[in-house]
Amino acid sequence: MPVFAEKKVVVINDFDAEKSDPETLEKIIALLSDIPEYCAVIINITGFEPSKNAKTKKLLAAVEKHGVVCEFDLLSKPKAAGLIIDRVSRLGCTISHENAEYIYDLTLGNLTLIGTEYKKLCVYAGVGSEITREIIDRLTPRLTETKTYDLANTLTEKRAKKAFRILDELFAQNVEAVVILSSLSGNFINFYRANLGKKYKINPNQTAADFNYPKNRAFLMSKTANEIYIKKCISLLFKADIKLKSTTLNNRVVIEKTMTEILML
């Protein structure tokens, strides 16, 4: 569109070569080899992480032969922190590198959210002021994933009061109990994987890559705990999951009871 424009763009969104039948894949590859001068084709994959299996490799090879393959990777935490410091200074404020990285953690490295947050923080702090941890905690909301990660940390550190306060916040945001438990279980699985990396003396970044974590989630492999303790926690969470899905017990009571059992281990 418009129909009579000199150039045409065709966008193929989230095409998964691995799930495609061989005939469809061959048709697309054939089309890529015969694109007219007035047309550009963009295969845009953002909804999932492409595999590196045979079909995907075949598609990538066909694209590279006639065009360009490009990966727009997430910024690393240090680079994102540098970007935040630069943008904050342009708006007349200051922020420490540590607090810039803290914003990165709270937003899970999402540049769109980062852009919204640093502008809001600068307006609140005012020109010539520093954006402190207190201001960030006051204004920057934690994503559900971030809160459940904090919840898992506080449970392993035996900080009961803070753990139940985080749970209160999650329920206040109307996050479903099954989502809380699933995310909490996922974080304990992260601890277990981090333990495996430490046990076999593997760098945390390599451990993250081995388990196909995106780069902005590699920090999850830095948190470790006693292996037997983590296994017991996962067992308790597994039992809680069964209760949530097979009984009429109050969902919040199930999670609170499980948290208490973890704190008492």
Image (spheres, rainbow, N blue to C red):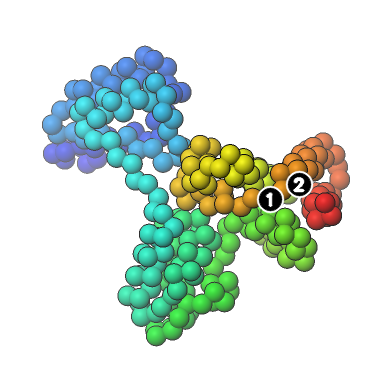
Is residue 172 at all visible to an observer of this figure? no
Tell me the amino acid under the disc marked 1. Ala
- Do the residues bearing badges 2 and 1 touch, measured as CB atoms within 8 Å? yes
| Residue 50 in the image: above or below residue 188 | above
Tell me the amino acid under the disc marked 2. Tyr
Secondary-structure class at tag 2: helix
Secondary-structure class at tag 1: loop
Q: Furthest residue to the front?
A: 201
| Residue 129 in the image: above or below residue 8 | below
Work out how far the residue at label 2 is from the one at label 1, CA to CA, in angstroms: 7 Å
Mark 1 nearby-residue class (10 Å; few <14, some 14–19, many ≥20): some
| Residue 99 in the image: above or below residue 184 | below
Whether residue 30 sits left or right of residue 49 in the image: it is left
Quarter of the rendering containing residue 42: top left
Q: Where in the figure is residue 241, as x and y percent of width and height?
A: 76, 40
- For residue 225, the mark is 1
Whether residue 126 sits left or right of residue 247 in the image: it is left
Q: Where in the figure is residue 265, as x and y percent of width and height?
A: 82, 51
- For residue 123, the mark is none
Q: Where in the figure is residue 130, as x and y percent of width and height?
A: 45, 81
Residue receiving disc 2 = 229
Mark 2 nearby-residue class (10 Å; few <14, some 14–19, many ≥20): some
Q: Nearest the camera: 126 or 96?
A: 96
Q: Nearest the camera: 48 or 186?
A: 186
Viewport quadrant of the N terminus: top left
What residue is shown at x 20% (from left), y 28% (from top)?
66
What residue is shown at x 61% (from left), y 52% (from top)?
223
Q: Where in the figure is residue 243, as x and y percent of width and height?
A: 82, 40
